[in-house]
Image: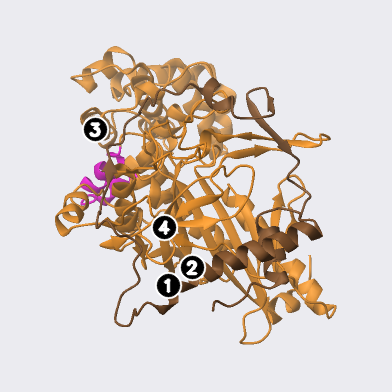
Amino acid sequence: MAKKLSRDDILKLAKLSRLSLTEDEVHDFDVELNTILDFISALESAKVDNLLPTDQVNGLTNVLRDDCLIDYGYSTESLLENVSNLKDHYIKVPKMIGES
Amino acid sequence: MIKKELLQKYHPTIGIECHVQLKTISKLFSGSANGINDALPNSQTNHIDFGLPGALPVTNSNAIDLAIRAGYALHTTAQKFSKFDRKHYFYPDLPMGYQITQYDFPIIKGGYIDIKIDNKIKRIGITRAHLESDAGKSLHPAGSDYSLVDLNRAGSPLLEIVSEPDMHSAIEARIYAFELFLAMKYAEVSEANLFYGNMRFDVNVSVSSTSKLGVRTETKNLNSFRSIEKTVEYEIERQIKILEKGGVIKQETRGYNDAKQITIVQRIKENADDYRYMPDPDIPPILITDDHLKRIHKTMPVLPDVWRSRLSVLGFSDLQINLLLMAQTDTDNHLLDFINNNLSDLNKAKTFVNWIINIELPIYQNNDENNFKDNILVPNDREKLFQDAYLLKEANKINSSKLTALLETIIKTNIKIDNLEQWATDNGYLQNSNEEELTRIIQDILSTNPKVVSDIMNGEVKAIGFLVGQVMSQTKGQANPKIVQDIIKQSLKL
């Protein structure tokens, strides 16, 4: 059994993600996230003594490109189409300064 | 200002983090342009910088090379193994929701920067330096309820250089930042344009009256040496005042207000940031071979600290040496070699340095409509001009004001002169040391100034200067003032 996520853990994750949750949502996430953790916890039964942590599985190293400009075929306009609020070519967002 | 005794009671400790924007053509993980200042907002971007799903970042090989160069400039060798990690936080100028950076295996570990203070060299340790991608730029228009984001900077390659907390005064902090700036400029790692924020400094300051370190504050995003010095001064005093009143220092992030020269709280850190670092699965680790290191090492120039010690025999002030060190990269990168090659004759070398500082450099820095920046002397021309001019000076064929005028004219007009003595004669720069001719002129002047002559005869020897001036003006500045003075004294039997 994985260590259960507490209500405080969920509130902290929400804060780090800049989400404000209703009581109902806290309850829903409590159930959902703990179900996911239970599922993943099957991994804890694997024997990993004497193994180094794995952060790459494909064995690749030095996947590099030359330092030159690449035209990916996307115009700035098409990229900005995904932006809900524009002002003078800037992305307009809620005021950042002054919040905690 | 607080009292000196209070300042002495507390021991300040300062560490500096510096974000250096690397001089690459494209971004760290994408092929959009890096470092285009003043471009239309969001025009230098692509699907990777926007953090769109499925976009694959690919590492820019030149960023790795420049990091290796930076390593050498910090007197260390880049790590053979380094990797990239995701640092998670949510902010509107970070579309991916994480920054790609290096956590536990940075590309540079260790190294140092030497600073000269009170005529002693002090070594400031480097903890680490890691590659990371920059965030976008946010604007906060005054009085509005929104912020504006420009992602042109998002993904630009940064090298974050973290110093050890080895500094203990505002001056040490300023000098460290300046030396780091020079090192990055010489190593050609960065454009190092402070105005465009190519180097941004975060300054950590704490004070303590015991052997235990105090709580530190971090003042972020400083981009001038002066603001670093002012910030440290201000923070030391602010923290001492709080402690003296029995208060506690809060661990917080502050910003610097240049107009008021004070720091202002931006964010209080209640607990350590929770960035949930994880290895970036999209970006395989970087392995650097010995051959690769050797290839880069071969192309490294002589570094500023080495120049500083070589030039110390000149006996010039730190300020003058700093001018020369700055001029090296602003001119043709050969200025210091030129001085160095002439160090065997110290008088000559000192004369050359004076000409460079007082005549040559001010011409390039001239900000009026004449732009002489394209007239920077090429090494061979400087060598020939200075050597020839020095011969004229040593042979006493030219006086110092004419010499200055001659050098200024030649550098400003960028003309090539084969025979400098001939050219100087033709253009009236040489001194007239023809005693016969000078004696004739002097006799004329003596006879037309009987009052001055009698003053001199009556002991007002200083009045000779007036007569010398008359001769100089009549010869249009070409007379050798020393010979003129000798002839006058002879004539008056002084």
Secondary structure under the numbered disc 1 in the rendered image = helix
**Relative image position of residue B320 (x, y in whole percent):** 44, 48
Q: Tags 2 and 4 in contact by the CB under 8 Å rule?
A: no
Q: Amino acid at mark 4?
A: His
| Location of mark 1 (residue) | A43
Calculate the distance from the C-alpha at mark 1 to the C-alpha at mark 3.
68 Å
| Location of mark 4 (residue) | B130
Query: Which labelled disc corresponds to residue B379?
Result: 3
Which is closer to the viewer, label 4 or label 3?
Answer: 4
Calculate the distance from the C-alpha at mark 4 to the C-alpha at mark 1.
32 Å
Magenta highlight on residue B335: yes
Query: Does residue B177 sit above or below B39 in this rendering?
Result: below
Which is closer to the viewer, label 4 or label 1?
Answer: 1
Secondary structure under the numbered disc 2 in the rendered image = helix
Q: Chain of mark 4?
A: B
Magenta highlight on residue B245: no
Which is closer to the viewer, label 2 or label 4?
Answer: 2
Q: In brown, which chain?
A: A
Calculate the distance from the C-alpha at mark 4 to the C-alpha at mark 3.
37 Å
Which stretch did the figure color magenta?
B333-350
Q: Tags 1 and 2 in contact by the CB under 8 Å rule?
A: yes
**From the viewer's perspective, is B89 left or right of B199?**
right
Crowding around mark 2 (Cα neighbors within 10 Å: few <14, some 14 to 19, many 20+) is few
| Location of mark 2 (residue) | A40
Q: In orange, which chain?
A: B
Calculate the distance from the C-alpha at mark 2 to the C-alpha at mark 4.
33 Å
Calculate the distance from the C-alpha at mark 1 to the C-alpha at mark 2.
6 Å
Q: Quadrant of the N terminus of chain B?
A: bottom right
Q: Quadrant of the C terminus of chain B?
A: top left
Q: Do pointers 2 and 4 mark residues of a single chain? A: no
